[in-house]
Image: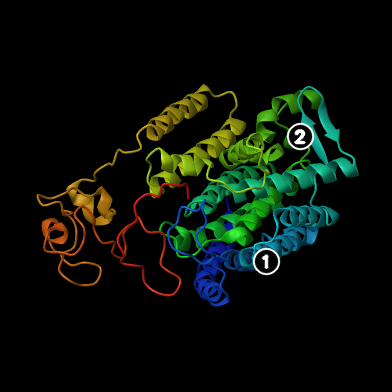
Amino acid sequence: MGQPVRDYLLTLCVTAAVTYLLTGPVRKFAIAVGAMPAIRARDVHREPTPRLGGIAMFGGLCAGLIVADHLYNLDGVFQLSNEPRALLSGAALIWLIGVLDDKFEIDALIKLGGQMIAAAVMVIQGLTILWLPIPGIGTVALTQWQGTLLTVALVVITINAVNFVDGLDGLAAGMVCIASAASFLYTYRLWYGHMIEAAAPATLFTAILMGMCLGFLPHNMHPARIFMGDSGSMLIGLVLAAGAISVTGQVDPDAMKLFAGSEREATHAMLPVFIPLLLPLTIIAIPAADLVLAIVRRTWNGQSPFAADRGHLHHRLLEIGHSHSRAVLIMYFWSALIAFGTVGYSVHSASLWIVLVIVGLSAVGLVLLLMPRFTPRAPRWAERFVPPRYRRRGRHGEDSGAAPSSAYGTQQEPRETQMGQDTDEPQGRRPVVAGVSGVNGATAIGPRSRLPERHKADTAR
């Protein structure tokens, strides 16, 4: 692998560190400016949570590009290509639109227009699709208008797919991180394995995107302390699309010299190799499917395709009985299976074992979907390292591995005392204390509420 891997890891770590360190001050800033809207009908969280997490992610993006520009093995990307500057220009524009939306809730059509303008800005500076490898025909050169329209369409679709899936704590950042990791492995193989310089910018983009997501996830995992908002979801969607567009249509099939014969035969044989690059939605197939289903559902119901609802895939996982954390992990699983399975198939398309592994893991995923109420129990030696819900229950219902004191430093009473007639709480209801996973995030101005946990509302939230 060699020296470039260390440079990419350094860039990734710097990006993650800057994003992580900026998220705390950004949260305080979001609270100060009032960027924490009230609970909406389609939301699954219970307490107002600040947005504007995209500000920290944009800071991480800038830091990653600055560090890469000063590294020996990566500075050539900035000298030989204008694509990093094109990415930064488009990202700054889409980030600004997202910040305004997080604060003022701008119209959906205005956001759509801003996404198209951001994609056009990148096209003007050279980040565009030049040609496409089509099976049975060969490499087809695109006109300037064709390349521009295709590039803008891919950027807009990818941004909205990521934005649509941003409905649970840590879901969008985790899925995009998985997709960018798979894309990084592929683009690095093209650049360093086959010495194709056109893949170097995409490799850098995916490494930086992984750092942005990894740095933000500790603050965004359930229960989230801050949301990335549209300023973050649209930003990472644009960077993901830019990484695919950067290499799609700019890598000559004959440059890899994997196949003998004509260019048409090489293109046909190499179609699995180009799947992750021609169609970036194959590595974010879950949010893409969610996007298509949402448009069809809303149009069928006579609503605008941009109208918000509670029919997304993650909402349905919660409705059938999965917990918040398990719904997120299931989405992670399917994203990783599709992303890494596609990349693995593109490398060894003739290997039967890859298909068998994908089929077997798909069966495992289906079993997980059909067991929403199954709670695994950790062995006793590992109970101190897992959340309380995975520990074995003692004789009186308390956790066998739980600490003797509560979150507030007082001795925990038995369950019978907490819920008996001697307390003012109604029978069958327990007060919610800090750290309970059923509450989404800390409140914006202080510790979590200790009010009783609310029952499920009659209407959809």
Q: Which mark is residue 100?
A: 1
Tell me the mark number nearer the camera, choosing from 1 and 2.
Answer: 1
Q: Nearer the viewer, residue 163 or 91?
A: 163
Residue 418 on image: x %, y %: 16, 61
Residue 398 on image: x %, y %: 16, 54
The furthest residue to the left: 395
Image quadrant assignment for residue 287 = top right
Q: Which mark is residue 253?
A: 2
Kindly state the secondary structure of the residue where label 1 is placed.
helix
Kindly state the secondary structure of the residue where label 2 is placed.
helix
Q: Nearer the viewer, residue 11 or 23?
A: 23
- The answer to whether any part of residue 139 appears in the image is yes
Q: Is residue 120 above or below residue 263?
A: below
Task: Residue type at mark 1: give it.
Answer: Leu
Mark 1 burial class by Cα count in 10 Å: few <14, some 14-19, many 20+? some
Residue 126 on image: x %, y %: 83, 53
291 relative to 336 in the view: left or right: right
Q: Nearer the viewer, residue 96 or 187?
A: 96
- The answer to whether any part of residue 6 appears in the image is no
Residue at 53% over, 54% down: 173
The furthest residue to the bottom: 32
